[in-house]
Image (tube, coloured by chain):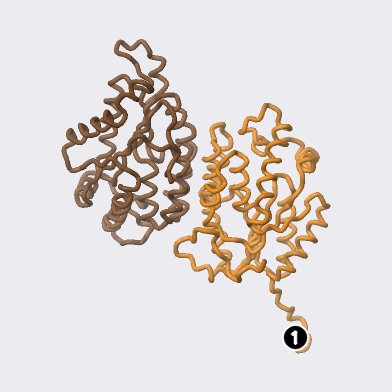
Chain colours: A orange, B brown
């Protein structure tokens, strides 16, 4: 599907925003916990900067407004599912308006580690109403590309165990109270998350990438797709002209 | 389509709404004292008071970081926390929860700030439908006279200074409150407010509120709500609903 040239809001245009001013490119990496998103973002950033693009990257709970509040709320044991969903949406709104849109206006490539889709998937995995959260998050800009790093739960488990060596309370969905066992809870919760993300593939035009491949294969695949989308107009090097002068 | 989730529980939810200076806080305070004196388990919830979210809100206000959307969302987050961990369990357990401001405040205020009417209504769809929502109707000048007369300087967001309506804080406050008043008036029918004329004497307003509570809730108060009979044998039950 061809995307319109200028970015559009999904369903709820933010007041006072002229989307034709948003000249930059918005690229999202989605996927479940521990799938390897941040590794790919780091590689992409390096590559894009070498190509001469100004890049910023951002991810969940990094806003000046709500980032700290979310971290603190997650330390406690009283963060309910709707509160969590809305806290993350607040965080996203702050980053969208104060970080992402200004960078797009300035012509940056904005790489986002998880977008509204992870917020939505977490809400859905906790039994919240899909239509509710879709409308709440409707003020998001539809990205130029969403790359969904997809894998199965067994692979995630092996990455967690071999990588970090321990299961995280929230990544294991312990707040859902499936039971006391973190491994079992991780499997059930992440299965739900993957299922929720899978249902978004067509609706939100995800490009699915097999995340069970080695890091460099995934990276090459991302590079190939980003090039093919022709999002990036790399200016021809001036070296030739300079040489001619000499 | 219903705005909120119906209350299927033993307890009750009573909320008050109106612009600043309408006298709603005074009235809900009087009503909750009266209900408690009748032996009912009564709890109180104020707008913008979640211990989980308050700090982020305070920080955003102090540093003037909010946009209309993030202002709306942080207040919804605060509300969600109070709904999930306070109001809902208390109403389930059979208490009467009295709320000073409810989702309607967001419907009025956030829309006055420029967010979409439909969007903000959907945002609060998880809220419990109140058994009674009182709206204190007051002319703008009366409310402004009460506010501007006897209190400290108006705060930045309270006065809607973020909207650039006027350079003068009081002027901005006037315009902003006027917009909020229009939104309240516009939704009064849609949401089924019980309207109280807030220019009447405090005593008369309170009498009307008590009448409405007895007419609307009447028997269901006696049958469902946690109640401590005269004599006070059931202290443990009354303690279920602390006053915050």
Closer to us: B52 or B115:
B115
What element does badge 1 sit on?
A: helix
The quadrant holding residue A190 is: top right
Query: Mark 1 — residue?
Result: A241
Check the image and name the residue furthest to the front: B1
Closer to us: A1 or A19:
A1
Q: Report the number of numbered marks.
A: 1
Taking B74 as reference, is B12 left or right? left
Tell me the residue at 68%/26% (across/down). A180
Residue B203: percent from left, percent from top: 18, 33
Taking A167 as reference, is B243 left or right? left
Tell me the residue at 73%/32% (across/down). A184
Residue A119: percent from left, percent from top: 59, 47
Question: Which quadrant of the rendered structure holds the C terminus of chain B?
Answer: top left
Taking B88 as reference, is A67 left or right? right
Chain for disc number 1: A
Residue B114: percent from left, percent from top: 40, 58
Check the image and name the residue furthest to the bottom: A245
Dot 1 surroundings within 10 Å: few (below 14), some, or many (20 or more)?
few
Tell me the residue at 56%/31% (across/down). A77
Residue A82: percent from left, percent from top: 53, 40
Q: Is residue A153 above or below residue B183?
A: above
Closer to us: B176 or A5:
A5
Q: Is residue A222 above or below residue A169?
A: below
Tell me the residue at 33%/61% (across/down). B165
Asked if one can make out residue A226 in the rendered structure from this viewpoint, the answer is yes
Taking B143 as reference, is B191 left or right? right
Q: Is residue B4 above or below residue B230?
A: below
Asked if one can make out residue B65 in the rendered structure from this viewpoint, the answer is no
């Amino acid at each position: 599907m061809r995307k319109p040239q200028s970015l559009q809001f999904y369903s709820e245009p933010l007041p006072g925003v002229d989307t034709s001013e948003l000249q930059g490119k918005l690229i999202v990496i989605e996927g479940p916990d521990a799938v390897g998103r941040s590794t790919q973002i780091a590689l992409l950033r390096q590559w894009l900067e070498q190509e001469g693009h100004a890049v910023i990257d951002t991810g969940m709970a990094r806003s000046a407004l709500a980032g700290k509040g979310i971290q603190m709320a997650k330390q406690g044991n009283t963060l309910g599912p709707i509160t969590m969903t809305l806290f993350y949406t607040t965080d996203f709104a702050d980053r969208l308006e104060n970080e992402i849109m200004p960078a797009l206006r300035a012509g940056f490539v904005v790489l986002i580690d998880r977008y509204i889709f992870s917020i939505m998937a977490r809400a859905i995995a906790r039994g919240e109403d899909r239509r509710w959260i879709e409308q709440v998050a409707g003020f998001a800009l539809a990205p130029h590309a969403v790359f969904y790093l997809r894998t199965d739960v067994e692979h995630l488990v092996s990455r967690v165990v071999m990588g970090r060596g321990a299961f995280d309370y929230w990544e294991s969905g312990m707040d859902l109270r499936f039971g006391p066992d973190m491994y079992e809870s991780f499997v059930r919760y992440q299965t739900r998350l993957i299922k929720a993300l899978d249902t978004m593939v067509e609706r939100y035009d995800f490009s699915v990438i097999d995340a069970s491949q080695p890091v460099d294969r995934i990276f090459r695949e991302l590079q190939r797709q980003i090039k093919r989308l022709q999002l990036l107009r790399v200016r021809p090097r001036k070296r030739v002209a300079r040489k001619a002068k000499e | 389509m219903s705005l909120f989730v119906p209350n299927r529980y033993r307890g009750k939810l009573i909320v008050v709404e109106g612009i600043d200076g309408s006298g709603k806080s005074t009235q809900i305070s009087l009503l909750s004292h009266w209900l408690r004196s009748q032996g009912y388990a009564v709890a109180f919830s104020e707008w913008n008071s979640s211990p989980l979210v308050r700090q982020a809100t305070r920080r955003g206000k102090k540093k003037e970081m909010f946009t209309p959307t993030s202002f709306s969302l942080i207040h919804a987050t605060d509300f969600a926390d109070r709904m999930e961990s306070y109001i809902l369990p208390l109403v389930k357990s059979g208490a009467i929860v009295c709320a000073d401001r409810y989702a309607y405040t967001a419907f009025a205020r956030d829309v006055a700030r420029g967010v979409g009417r439909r969007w903000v209504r959907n945002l609060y769809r998880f809220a419990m439908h109140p058994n009674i929502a009182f709206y204190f109707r007051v002319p703008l000048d009366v409310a402004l006279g009460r506010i501007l007369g006897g209190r400290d300087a108006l705060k930045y967001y309270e006065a809607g200074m973020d909207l650039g309506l006027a350079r003068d804080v009081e002027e901005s406050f006037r315009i902003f409150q006027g917009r909020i008043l229009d939104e309240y008036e516009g939704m009064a029918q849609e949401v089924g407010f019980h309207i109280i004329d807030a220019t009447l004497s405090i005593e008369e307003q309170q009498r009307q509120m008590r009448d409405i509570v007895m007419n609307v809730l009447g028997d269901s108060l006696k049958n469902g709500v946690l109640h401590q009979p005269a004599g006070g044998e059931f202290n443990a039950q009354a303690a279920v609903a602390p006053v915050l």
